[in-house]
Amino acid sequence: MALRVLFLMLVLLAAARASSPAASLDAASLLAFKSACAGAGRGTGTAALDSWTESTDPCSGEWRGVTCLWSSSSSATSRVRRVVLEGLGLAGDAGAIAALTDLPSLSFLSLKNNTFTGSLRDVDFSPLAPHLKLLYLSGNGFSGRFPESILRLRHLRRLDLSGNRLTGTIPPEIGHRLRALVTLHLARNSFVGRVPSSLESMPKVAELNVSGNNLSGQIPKHLATAFPASSFLGNPELCGAPLRRRCDGQHQRVHTSGHGRRSSHDRWMVVMIMVAVGAAVATLIAAALCAVLCLKNKKLTRPRANSRTSSMSTSREETVRFDGCCEEFDVRALMMGAAEMLGKGAAATTYRVVMGGQQDVGDAGAEETKGEAVVVKRLRRREGTTREDEGRRRELAREMGSWRHANIVDLRAFYASEEELLLVFDYIPNGSLHSLLHENRGPARAPLDWQTRLRLAQDAAQGLAYLHGVSGSRLAHRHLTSSNILVDGGGSARVSDFALLQLLLPAPPSEKALQKQDVRDFGVILLEILTGRSPEDGKVDIPRWVRTVVREEWTSEVFDMELLRTRGAEDEMVALLQVALLCAADNPRERPRMAVVSKMIEDIRDRGSKRSKCSASPSQAGCSYDSSPCASEGTTKSTTASSS
């Protein structure tokens, strides 16, 4: 079958090159795909492609499921951009898909819920690497191992291979190769082996589903906190959070054949247990002796209530560095740096510190401080804090130091003592979103344009969605404002001060409710971006005011005057306004998760960039290339707006 499809493709392509422009080259590939489906002799889907004829152009709008985009290099040519053929009963070998890989501008391919079969490893998806972003092949009968050529699709954002018969292991390097993925669905196949730890390194992934396979081992830590149990169910040998199946010795042991090996293994286990017990007893004895000596020392010295012995101070002090922190950092270098107070709040006092700074005389004769600038937040110990509370906040500080994302402010190190906790963050130079929106209002102000505002909104949403996910619904910001969204040197927004209040106060019973409060606060920030109003004015409840204006059909009245200068972006503004009001809903249950909010803003921005780059054909109306698949044109079977 594969050879037959290849021969047919070569014949059609040769004829097209001899007599037709670029659009006909795309027609040849599509007609080769149609012929491969017809030659399969299965299903009822060949009639669904009756509109695909040699006498018409694929970009005429008459070809079912085909959408084109005008070429930027020539106004006279257009290329096929999307092929969406879902639930049409199409059949054929996997080789039929090879015909579609010769479409050079294809960015969206969906053949889900058909009856294709065969091994996807026989298909080379590499020619689609320059443009392909969405690939949906779920609900077919594809077999064989994971297709390695898919790992070369560097721009791929959504991949759905669920509901097939794929076998073997999930490629260990998938997370390193497909860095742009937002959605990865591999459910209901026959994959074996472990869940790749490389999936933890994908910065944008918001949806993951590997349920219904034969995976085994422990779920990687960050995936366990970022995704619900439903993402991993149906794998009998998979264990660890968020599943209820614990990873004990029985699950983790590797069984080997032969009685002798098992006996040897058991003997070694007995020896190791005896050694561990002996070490534990020796440690307890040593600890008891140390306690006795300390009590005697205390009776002899009797220090005053406010003083501490140097030995106790040393045992209670701790300096921890994380990835990206300078190796020479210690509290002494921090204290010797040039410091400037930036602010004092209920949670902490904030300083800008230049470590290793030296006073030099600049060209203008003024003194300049050179060195590495960091931000230090000083949290003092609260009255009544127990040792358990102190241990809890140090453990939380360690967890915060492991969080890494392009849209958050990284914690680089911390110093903890009995009296205080010093948190060392990256210094973000360009101020906050609040200052960009509200400061220097007047005739001399440089307006903050719409594209910049929308990009900052998307950055902040991605950062907050990551923090909600990586903390496993346990933590929340609890004080999210536009002042806590900083802008770095590259113009990207970064969320700061997440979970800072949890370092001071005991966590309340329901952190999920507080994450819903974060979503509402983010909705208010979106309204700030759109209206130019600051909630700190205290004169008006912004969400209530916006609802009133919109209800009375004065929608244009809510937008900042600076935004009215932007032409052609009204639809995007209204769309973001709808997202903001959804986030700020009075009922917390109606507020979406931040991962969903981030995706909605991303889709709004993608639609805006496409509108500015090209003039969409009528068949594209209401359908984003990077959104979830829309229903195939002319079909009666509806598809959801999700990416599953």
Image (spheres, grey):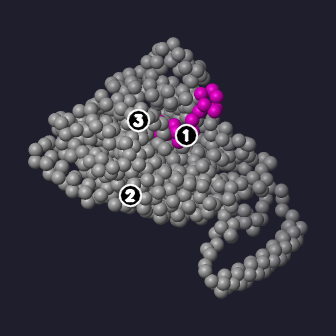
Q: CA distance from mark 1 to mark 3?
A: 26 Å
Q: Above or below — where is 17 with respect to 53?
A: below
- Amino acid marked by disc 2: Gly
Asked if residue 123 lies left or right of residue 287, the reply is left
- The residue under the point 49% across, 44% down is 644
Residue 493 place in picture, x, y as percent:
47, 42
Q: Secondary structure at mark 1?
A: helix
Q: Earlier in the sequence, mark 1 or mark 3?
A: 1
Q: Above or below — where is 567 with respect to 53?
A: above
Please give the residue where the numbered disc 1 appears in the rendered image.
594
Q: Secondary structure at mark 2?
A: strand
- The residue under the point 60% across, 31% down is 590
Q: Earlier in the sequence, mark 2 or mark 3?
A: 2
User: Quick one: 503 or 165, which is closer to the camera?
Assistant: 165
The magenta stretch spans residue 225: no
Please give the residue where the numbered disc 3 appears in the rendered image.
631
- Amino acid marked by disc 1: Met
The magenta stretch spans residue 593: yes
- Amino acid marked by disc 3: Ala
Q: Which residues are magenta?
A: 585-608
In the picture as drawn, the residue positioned furthest to the top comes out as 552
Q: Earlier in the sequence, mark 1 or mark 2?
A: 2
